[in-house]
Image: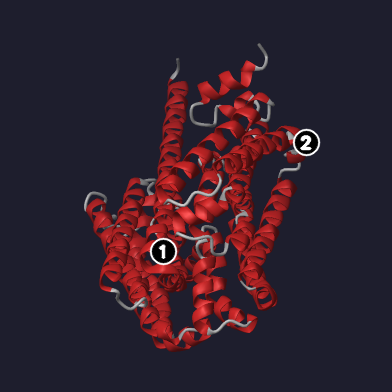
Amino acid sequence: MDEKSVQRRKAFMMKESENNQLVKGALLLTLAGLISKLLSAGYRIPLQNLTGDMGFYVYQQVYPFLGIALMLALYGFPAAISKMTAEMGDQGKGLSLRNFYIPVFLLLVIICGSVCLFLFFNADNLAVWVGDPDLTLTYKLVAFIFLLIPFSALMRGMFQGRQLMQPTAYSQIGEQLTRVTLIIAAAVWIYLNQANIYTIGQAAAAAAFAGAVSAIVILLFFFRRYQPAAEGRFIIPWQYYVRTLFILGIAAALNHMVLIIIQFADTFTLIPSLQAYGLDKDEAMKAKGVFDRGQPLVQFGTVLGSSFALALIPVISAEKLKQRPAALTRSIRSAILISFYLAAGATVGLISIFPETNRLLFLDEDGTGPLRILAVSVFLSSIGITAASILQGLGYMKRTAVFIGATFFLKWIANQMLVPFWGIGGSAVATVLSLAVFTCLTVMQLRQKLPVLHLGKHMNWSAFVLSAAGMVSFLAAADYVTGTITSRTGLLVYVMCTAIMGAIIYLILLLRLKAFKEEELFMLPFAGVLIRIHKARDH
């Protein structure tokens, strides 16, 4: 083998190693995101049990602000900084503290400091706008969270630009664990001392601040091992820094905020609209607390419906689509079809057992009707988020951010039109309508960019309908046989057994009726078992 061939082989192996490291790192980030989302969905159930619907209402009036800050620190600004790091590295510019990190940090301080000052000095106006002046102090405390964003975002962006994903993943999980632990501790204290319900909102802000500090401590631990270069002199491109931080930073954050911006619209519109519906202030607050019961269930269902597909995202890029168009198109199609089957099954199952689930998790059946409508969001958000994530991988991040912005405004307007007539049922319909538009926009855009996708042609509709019917029949029979269950322990056994058995029946029917192709099953956990069931019908 001649010297040129050896060099080419070494270059190829180095590139493959780099690609593998990037994919592994992206998968680690995906896993960390899934763990954090499950924690975020799970802790709200004991929070509601301990503080009641009124306490849950207070928390949900604060959560969207905290969620936006978290997304900016975790996804938005780090993505922008990572992109600048990679692009300037490709240009051969050494990124020093003086020419890159300090200027970018100062810009982040200006941006986040401005948001902090705006929130702090307008907290009373915001509280009046959302319909509850008692939230003023809580919103003032929330403002301080934004002061910590520059520290964590800069370090995360620096690490990701060097393809080091572990610091971001570990800091994300550490931040979420700290936040969840402190919020539940505060809820227990409020329950035991019968404290003012608004304390939970203030505790949520304090817990988010403590979580952000813990993330910074974890990042600093890694920062000591991977310090930035001391060299590198060039004219500071301030306009490039500002443009990238604003446009890409906000777009990247928005792409992770579909469910948060829906709740953000509810924060500002639901209480005034419920009062227009005829409820007094306390009744409107309790009604919103009941409606917000659906949020952790929607989030949990969306994680289930989109998680397997999202694991595919790290291998999707515009470059790879050009290199291997047929193989990547098949992978994208499989991801969407798997997301469809899982999300549709989760939605149908949740609607079927919602009365028992509501009593098990939240102690009564209040709001079951509207929350069943809201459960359709599980299906829509799973498909929409999967399609949007694929578009982002192909380089259409700004376009999907525009779709999410349109979803926010549609939800806002629909709430003001529907809630005064239908109460929280109107808000459920508004959520479903806005997410339906978001899903249609993303799927249509994906079909336009990948005209050979042919999703409808590859969907086994008869297998899906028969499988869903089999699951619903089992759940209806179980409900008829058991009757009304009064004890919470009995409800726990019933819901767990019916949910697991219903899911097994649905999955086995899908496999036996050939809803999946064999290569699609390799993407799922326990692929060997699933393939044996899939082939059983052939013998």
Residue 511 higher or lower than 318, as above or below: above
Determine if residue 434 is in view: yes
Quarter holding residue 78: bottom left
Dot 2 falls on a residue whose secondary structure is helix
Q: Position of residue 184 (x, y in %)?
A: 31, 61
The residue that disc 1 covers is 48
Determine if residue 233 is in view: no
Residue 400 higher or lower than 141, as above or below: above
Which of these two is toward me, 28 or 516? Answer: 516
Q: Residue at x 46, y 61 (%)?
A: 76
Amino acid tagged 2: Lys
Quarter holding residue 134: bottom left
Which part of the image, by quadrant, shows the C terminus?
top right
Indicate which disc residue 280 carries. none
Which of these two is toward me, 261 or 423? Answer: 423
Judged by depth in the image, the label closer to the viewer, 2 or 1, is: 1
The colour scheme of the drawn protein is secondary structure
Is 412 left, or right, of 209 in this rendering? Answer: right
User: CB of mark 2 within 8 Å of CB of mark 1?
Assistant: no
Q: Residue at x 49, y 67 (%)?
A: 240
Q: Residue furthest right?
A: 457
Which part of the image, by quadrant, shows the N terminus?
top left
Q: Position of residue 347 (x, y in %)?
A: 61, 48
Dot 1 falls on a residue whose secondary structure is helix
Task: Give the tally of numbered discs.
Answer: 2
The residue that disc 2 covers is 457
Amino acid tagged 1: Gln
Q: CA distance from mark 2 to mark 1?
A: 44 Å
Whichever of callouts 2 and 1 sits on the residue coming sooner in the sequence is: 1
Is 370 left, or right, of 162 in this rendering? Answer: right
